[in-house]
Image (cartoon, rainbow, N blue to C red):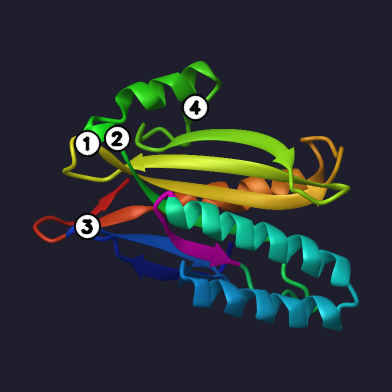
Amino acid sequence: MTSLRAELLGLPGGLPRFRLLLPEGWSATEITPEATEQMEQQARKVFMRAGRPDLDGVFSSTLERAMRELGRAGGRYAILPGAGPDGVAPPLSLIVSLISGEADAPLDDWVAARFRRGAEMLDRSGQIVLWRERSSAGERGVEQAQSTYVAPVPDTARTKALMLTGTALIEEGVPDTSDAVVAGHAVFDAIVSTLSWVLADAGTRRA
């Protein structure tokens, strides 16, 4: 991530905006049905040029399912890489969602339960919670290696948080120490570690 670009994104309801630094070629798109279709069409062209229609099917179905589910659950943005030198985009995605405690209660108990299941802090700031999981991608021979991050929204008494879900599509059965898994985790960690909040009365605050 030697070349970075700042992306300033907004949240509804008067909540503060936030900023992420994205690697060269990556971009953020608001989650809408139209945006999902556009991303699928762009990816399809890339995969067809690369002679990999199998990746097109896996990527499209995974993207559509993730967009639909996360849109219902507060999903706001999809952050995706562009095509590499070979014309193929890495099978990576980072979904940004806004989550809220039930009945506007603090999310503390929910986060504590995540820690009991193995969550940890992303960095020394103690503001971003991280956990990793693997699951089926819904396609034969393909799995999802996911990194999930949660950061409280400032001035909400921890009743609202930003959830960033990074997904790497990998070959089924590859070890967690494989290059594909390690590289996916590393790029998501690097992006999320740049999270900062833009506050109207106090400038910028790091997460």
Task: Tell me the tag on residue 16.
Answer: 3
Q: Residue at x 25, y 61 (%)?
A: 12
Task: Tell me the tag on residue 101.
Answer: 2
Mark 3, Cα crowd under 10 Å, few <14 / some 14-19 / many 20+, is: some
Tags 1 and 2 in contact by the CB under 8 Å rule? Answer: yes
Q: Quadrant of residue 197?
A: bottom left
- Residue 76 drawn above or below residue 148: below
Label 2: element kind? loop
Mark 1, Cα crowd under 10 Å, few <14 / some 14-19 / many 20+, is: few
Task: Pick whichever of labels 4 and 1 is earlier in the sequence.
Answer: 1
Q: Which residue is mark 1?
A: 104
Label 4: element kind? strand
- Residue 59 drawn above or below residue 186: below
Residue 13: give x, y in percent of width and height.
Answer: 19, 58
Camera-nearest label, 3 or 4? 3
Which residue is more in the foreground, 130 or 67?
67
Residue 84: give x, y in percent of width and height.
Answer: 73, 74
- Label 4 amino acid? Glu
- Residue extent of the magenta highlight: 73-80
Magenta span: predominant SS is: strand
> How many angstroms separate mark 1 from mark 2 (CA)?
5 Å
Task: Tell me the tag on residue 120.
Answer: 4
**In magenta stretch: residue 74:** yes
Residue 157: give x, y in percent of width and height.
Answer: 18, 35
Q: Residue furthest top?
A: 116
